[in-house]
Amino acid sequence: MRCVIYTGDVDVTGDVILQRARLRFNVILPRPDDIEFVFLRRRLWVEARPYPIFTLLGQSVGSLVLGFEALLKFVPDIYIDTMGYAFTLPMFKYLGSCRVACYVHYPTISTDMLERVSQRTQTYNNASFISRSPLLSYMKLIYYRLFAYMYGVAGNRSDVVMVNSSWTFGHISSLWQADGRTYVVYPPCDVHEFMTIPLDSHGEDLVRSVVSVAQFRPEKDHSLQLKAFRKFISGLQSPEESRLHRLVLVGSCRNDEDVARVEGLKALSLELGIDQLVEFRLNVPFDELKRCLAEATVGIHTMWNEHFGIGRWWLNMLDM
């Protein structure tokens, strides 16, 4: 059986991609020779940067451009979308005559997003100038409802729908109406390597680490972590005591936008006066991630309505 992976990483080879998967995630494939890569050059079409307004719609249309390039280069028997490009499902099903499936990590739009716009709540994807305006909020709500309808129609074309949590299951079932074809498939979490961490791994080190593990995406709300840490530090008895604490932000950067987001977080930490107490560890290998968790005194996660249950995962790591 051939497993063909579409990728936009055109500046590396397939062997390098597999090496990175092993280095960063400790993923070792049993038959790497059966893996082939098809390199796509139109990934810019699915990034947020070209669409300052109507971002969801722009990226979804862009996914059709990228999907069409993928079809021209290779037509699979079974197409599985794991990136959240639901609008490519009808394309592969009807133009490519493929069986189609998907694994949804997070819905592109959710009923929660509709509710926040309806209540005029300012968030990372609902700017203050929109939330303050009844007219703009009403227009955005119409846009979101139309997009949600199109998203549901596209997703419903999938022969099999897999989701990563009961939270995602609820939203996808509501939007896609794919009853009987939607299944919760929890992500496999191999904790064997973490269980090798000694219980007394802190040793004589007096520095207490508050560790966050998350991609540098806007919905992860790293700025809230910095502000919370600043408030914590300000409540300590002395500057000497504050120097015994560290906030360690561990995560990956997918593109230039994420890199710019990290630079903004560094600027915020400087503004808050905690830059000497904050560490940014980007795209770390698995061994370093394991070391960060071993040194952690506290785990922190600030994404609102977290879908993966990472808070419970954190508790398991710290209890080992």
Image (cartoon, helix red, strand yellow):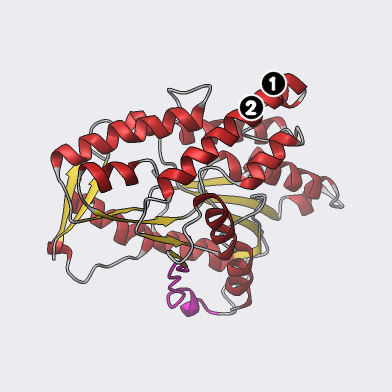
Find numbered disc 1 in the image and state the secondary structure of the residue it sits on: helix
Marks 1,2: beta carbons within 8 A? yes
Task: Identify the residue at image location x=77%, y=23%.
Answer: 132
> Which stretch did the figure color magenta?
184-198
Asked whether residue 90 is drawn in magenta, I would say no
Quarter of the image for residue 92 reads: top left
Q: In the rendered structure, find residue 140 and report the number of the disc placed on it.
A: 2
Query: Given the image, on which type of amino acid does mark 1 rest?
Result: Leu
Q: Position of residue 11 (x, y in %)?
A: 22, 37
Q: How far is mark 1 from mark 2, CA to CA?
A: 6 Å
Query: Given the image, on which type of amino acid does mark 2 rest?
Result: Lys
Q: In the rendered structure, find residue 136 and report the number of the disc placed on it.
A: 1
Q: Position of residue 300 (x, y in %)?
A: 66, 57
Residue 31 shows in the view: yes
- From the image, give the main secondary structure of the stretch colored magenta: loop
Other-residue count near label 2 (Cα within 10 Å), few / some / many at <14 / 14–19 / ≥20: some
